[in-house]
Amino acid sequence: MTPAGKVFWLNTVLLVAIVMLFVASLLWGESHLMVAETIQDMLAGHRSAGVIIVEQLRLPRAVLALVVGGVLGLAGATLQGYLRNPLADPGILGVSGGAALGAVCVFYTGLMQVSVAVLPLGGLVGALCAVVLLMGLVGRGGTVVLLLAGAALSSFAAALTALVLNLVPSPYASYEIMHWLMGSLTDRTFTHVLVCLPGAVCGALLMFSVARALDALTLGEDVATSLGFSLWGARGVQTRLVLGAALAVGSCVAVSGAIGFVGLVVPHVLRPLTGYQPSRLLLPSFLGGSVLLLAADMVVRLVPTGPELHLGVLTALIGAPVFFARVVMLKRSEP
């Protein structure tokens, strides 16, 4: 089978898995629903308890799991392709830290009392400020400048977040901040979906637009330039990629909190199945990220752990063993 054929079947399997997990996420949870009756009420327009649970609690959560997981997987694959580094992660841009800082400032100032939309909007403002700062720092610099700017921005945002945590006068506020920083999709509504979706869609389209350039960059920057790809400048590959990844990841982190390892693990797992052509990995990584987060969100909802397990904690528990296994495989492959 050709590499393109393998990618087609992989995408098909992942799409089927997404549909199955999405439907399961709507119908199964802590509250037992009569599936047939709930579907009949939805089709008839009746506002039964089952319909309200599905439409107002489970549907926004499932949509966010699909979008956030997909964006993190896509951003990881795009950055790994551009930097030619399989350990690149969406967090290296520092935008996740900016979103976290914005949300923490909302907790600190007590603005959450105004509206449920203030928290995700605060995270989004923090992410956008980080995007502007990142783009200003990078300018026409290359990949080394991008990595250094991202590292500096991440460290600065983490330091400010720790400072705010240190100054918070209320233990309850500190608990809420730590709860949010661990990542979760609990109690999310369509307000959160509306905050997240525009940036996620625009950012994803920008990342998909650099697919062919990523293939050319595997041969080096000079070859990519000779093939007609503009790497720098306002419309260059780096600008579109960084802006797209930062905008999409920042919008998602603003509503979900910090969810790690998705953008790192998913491209690693799928790369051997797609071949080592970066453009072929983008769509499978988006779909694979959605599958992972939909499945993980169902696990944290259904596993009886007392207080609900945070999504970011579970993805870290999944991701770390994957890399342990990768290390063991690499050691065994050495002569």
Image: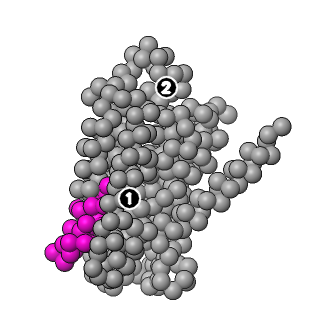
Q: Specify the quadrant of the image occupied by residue 233.
A: top left
Residue at 49% x, 35% y is 83
Q: From the viewer's perspective, tell me whether residue 266 is left or right of residue 46.
A: right
Q: Residue furthest right?
A: 335
Residue at 55% x, 63% y is 316
Is residue 184 at all visible to an observer of this figure?
A: yes
Q: What type of secondary structure mainly makes up the magenta span?
A: helix
Query: Label 2: few (<14), some or many (≥20) within 10 Å?
Result: many
Q: Which residue in the structure is indicated by mark 1? A: 158
Q: Secondary structure at mark 2?
A: helix
Amino acid type, residue under disc 2 in the picture: Leu
Above or below, 214 against 24 in this view is above
Q: Nearer the viewer, residue 106 or 322?
A: 106
Is residue 12 at all visible to an observer of this figure?
A: no
Residue interval drawn in magenta: 98-123
Q: Earlier in the sequence, mark 2 or mark 1?
A: 1
Amino acid type, residue under disc 1 in the picture: Ala
Residue 322: % across, % down:
65, 56
Residue 156: % across, % down:
35, 53
Q: Nearer the viewer, residue 146 or 84?
A: 146
Is 220 inside the magenta-drawn segment?
no
Query: Label 1: few (<14), some or many (≥20) within 10 Å?
Result: some
Q: Which residue in the structure is indicated by mark 2? A: 217
Above or below, 267 against 257 in this view is above
Residue at 26% x, 56% y is 126
Is 111 inside the magenta-drawn segment?
yes
Q: Nearer the viewer, mark 2 or mark 1?
A: 1
Above or below, 149 against 70 in this view is above
Q: From the viewer's perspective, tell me whether residue 297 is left or right of residue 325.
A: left
Above or below, 93 against 182 in this view is above
